[in-house]
Each structure stands twice: as C-alpha cells, then as structure tokens.
Image (cartoon, rainbow, N blue to C red):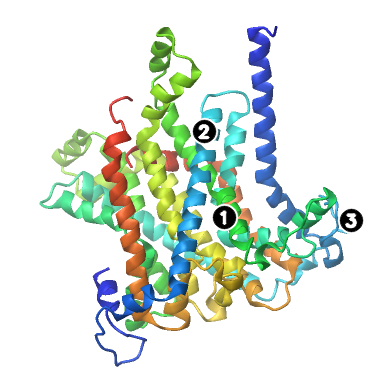
Amino acid sequence: MISYRQKQHLGKIIKYIVLTIVAFITLFPLVIVLSSSFKNESELFNFPFRFIPENPIVTNFARLMDKFPLYIWNSVKLTFTIVVVQLFTAATGAYVFTKLYWKGRDFIFGLYLASMMIPMQAVMIPQFLIIRNINLYDTHASLVLLGAFTAFGTFLIKQYFMSIPDTYCEAARIDGAKEWAIFTTLMLPMSKSVLVTQVIFSFRFFWNDFFTPLIYITTPELKTLPLGMTDFVREQYVYWGPQMAAALISIIPVLIIFLFGQKYFVQGVASSGLKG
Amino acid sequence: MIMAVALSFTNYSGGPRFRFIGLKNYIVAFSDPNFLSYLFVTFKFMTITVLFQIGLGLAFALILARNFRACSIYRGILYLPNILSSVAVGLAFMFIFEPSNGFMNQMLNSLGLPTSKWLASSKSSLSVIITIAIWQNFGYYMVLFIGGLQNISITLYEAAEMDGAGKIKQFFHVTLPGLSPILFYGLTIAIIRGFQVFDYIYIMTGGQQGGGPAGSTNVLAFDIYLNAFTFFRFGYASAESVVLMIIILAVTFLQSHGQKKWVNYDII
C-alpha cells in the first residue's frame, strides 16, 4: 500500500512533469526562431535540431538592413503616439465618467461599452470609406485617429477610479481646486498601477497590430514592422533565415516588457474578467 | 454600423455611381456554395478553438491557481505566446510546418510516422492554423480563470470538506459555480474572437492569394477583407460583415440569456 504522504508526493511529481512538458512545448517554437535567425540556409533544416548553430552568422539580420530600420522606426513612432493619445483619452474619459455628475452619463457610457461588442469587421468598411473621404488614406494620421479611443482602457481605468472615494475630490473642490488640477495632482498619482497596465496593453496591441496597417497603408516607406514582415509572405521564394530574424526582432520588445511587467499583464487580464 | 447595413443594400464599388439593389447581395451570398463553405469553415474553426482554449485554460488554471514553488514561472511561460504578434507567430510556424523537410516533418520521419504537407494540403491546413490559435491563446484564458479561482473563498472548500465532499464533488459544487461568471465571460470572448480570425489566415496561406488550398482555410472575416480591399466590392463585403455581426450578436445574446441558468453570482 502507498501511504497518503507518498501518494501526495507522487501527485506533485506528476504535476511538475506535466507542467514542464507543456512549458517546453510552449517555448520550443520561440527557441527555434531564436536559433534559426543565426543559421545559414544550408543549416536551417538540419535534423536533429541544434540550439547553437554550427557556424553562427549575422547575415540574416544584415539582409534586413535596407528596409527594416524604417519599418521599426515607423512602428516605434506610431506605437508611442497612439499609446500616449490613448492614455490621455482613456484617463480623462474615465474621470468624466466617474467623478463628474452629468445628465445621461451612464447612458453614454453604456453606448461606449456597447461599441466593444460590435465586431470590427462590421465597422471597418464604413470607417475605411470615411478615412478615404477625408483624405487620410495611406497616412500615419489615419492609424492614430483610429486608435485614439479605447473603450476597454476607459473601462479599466474607470473601474479603478471608482474605488477612490469621492470625498477626496470633494475636499479638493472645497479648497478651490479646478477639475483639471484634481485630475492631474490627485487622481493620476493615486492610480499609477492601472495606468501602467493600460500603457502595457495598448503598447502590446499596437506594436503587434497587423490588420489596420494592412488596410490603410500601401506606401512601402510608411509600413509598420508587422506589415513589413509580410513582405516575405508575398515573395515567390522564401528566405527563411531573414524571416526568422525579422520575427525575432518584433518579439524582443514585448518580451522585455513582459519580463519586467508580468504582474501588470495579469492584472489587466484579471480585472477585465472580474466585472465582465 | 448603420452605414455598413446601408451599404450592404447597394452595389457600391468605390466609384461615384452606385444604386440601391435591395437584398440582392444577401441573395447572392446565400446561394453561393463558396460562401456557405466559408461559413462552415468559420464555424468549424470557432468550435474547435473554443473547446480547446477553454478546456486547456481551465485545466492549467486548476493546476496553477494554488501557490507552490515556481508556479509563477509556469504561469508566465504558458501565458507568454499570447503577448506575441500573430505575424511573428505565423512566420515561425510556417517554418516549423514547412511542407517538405521542415522541423515537424523531420521529427515525424525520425519517429517513423507519416509526414504531411501541412499548410499546402487542403486536408491539413485548417488543422495547423487551429493548433497555432490554441497554442497562442489558451494561456490568456488560463490567467483569466486563475484570477477567478483565487476569488473563491477558501472557507467554502473547508465547509465542503467538513460535509465530507470529495475532490470531485468539490469541483462540481464549489469550483464550477464559483467560477461560472468568469467562465461565461471567457467563453463569450473566445467565441467572438474565433469568429473573427484573420491574421493567421492572411499570413500563413499566402496573403491576398490566401485562403488555403481549395479555399480550405477561407473564413468569413478573410473573405470580407478580400471582397472589400482586393476586389472593391464594398456592397457585397458589407453584406457579409452584417451576416458576421448578426451571428456574433446572436451568440452573445443567447449566452447572456442562457447564463441566468448556469451562472451563479452569489457564491463568491
């Protein structure tokens, strides 16, 4: 007979084995990308797979040098702009929806939330026609405009603002503070963690966003990194090495942010569910 | 949205002249066997990915919800694919599933198993994309469910144990009801996202010529894109997008209606 303790012990070992196998499967494709971007074409398909290439090369990255620096710069510029704009609209929006009282507020917020439920495909064609009519097609401004508002982010920050008691704001109002001053000197410093969560989420989304640039950008000089990466898809011959190198480049920034801000990711996912 | 519905009744194709053609776009769509097959592919993709994403997400949430040594490392690793760009993920898996001597085929070869053409074959291309969608997304649902599980009060389990309930009974009478609001939320999100899949299809089946061999991976969202932005049939594409919207809203509505039966908000 196996004792209870032994049984518990065995269960623990099985748990670790299962988790390790799954973690391995999860990470393995990333390991392949990492190591393949330093391999030359003849070594790429060697089997068994070697993590450290026999002759590590950097020519895969060098092959990207003519176009990719521009793609990366476009992505950095756009992502940064949109993240800042979104943070501003979401935070001010959340403030207006929680700490100010006005007629029809909850109704408007309801509409705002409902916009999250409507699939993007249903609005994209009218959106496209509007953007084209105001002559913003094939400009970066169109992407900023489309990304300027975030119902999810407003909701996220609003949930947090609601947990801050109104009495703080009222006290400040009695002291003669303007709404803007209350917002910037009182509310924002108290909600740093949710603001960081919002920044991380919108950074990840727009850094990875592929569909919007695909529709709105055609000039090669304006392409973002994810869109530029699909150049590989359209070519007749596939250059696997540079393709893996490009994938690696696009992964690194989110990976770094993930390593330092894992708890904010978890917070963002969890709080989206709690009130969902 | 109103504009989309209005457009769907016209034959607008970007030029200055277009006219009202009533329900013709819808009639064309539903009498086209291709459209019906795209619809079928979309439903198939959605059903399988939702089952596995929610199933795996729940299974690993149950394992990882309690704190133990290294649990946060495992959580991080399983969630990791979710933050990556679908383009990078698509490119990586195209390499792994390369049809002639990619990594997957060589591994199957060395194990003596039959190889496959993967994305280049109409039989397996959808399965490959489904696998990748599951790989990338189940971690999201896991994190979501861990949050939900940690909100269930420990005293409920203690009480259940006092009453002599075993582990399985505890799962069905404490864990599932306690998790049901978040399970419901996760399910809704997974279904909506399943219907909207686009990026993988575009990237892995050849861009604008995409849709997979014999249209085997042509989902509705992809066909909308093709019709609108490659063929400039805005009217017809709008009609398709209205169909997609109605499906999604109907599912959401049915779910929020059905949730009253099985979602329990009182237990936490």
Q: Amino acid at mark 3?
A: Glu
- The residue identified by callout 2 is B61
Q: Is residue A98 left or right of residue A103?
A: right
Q: Amino acid at mark 2?
A: Ala
SS at mark 2 in the image: helix
Residue B39: percent from left, percent from top = 44, 65
- The residue identified by callout 3 is A54
Residue A163: percent from left, percent from top = 28, 35
Residue A93: percent from left, percent from top = 27, 53
Residue A74: percent from left, percent from top = 54, 70
Q: Is residue B200 left or right of residue B114?
A: left
Between the C-alphas of marks 2 and 3, the distance is: 40 Å
Does the CB distance between marks 2 and 3 fall below 8 Å? no
Disc 1 and disc 3 on one polypeptide chain: no
Q: Amino acid at mark 1?
A: Ile
Query: Mark number for residue B130?
Result: 1
Q: Identify the subunit bearing mark 1.
A: B
Q: Residue at x 42, y 62 (%)?
A: A82
Nearest the viewer among A63 and B8 is B8
Q: Is residue A225 left or right of residue A148?
A: right
Dot in front, 1 or 3: 1
Image position of B96 with respect to A123: above or below: above
- Residue at the extreme left: A103
Q: Identify the subunit bearing mark 2.
A: B
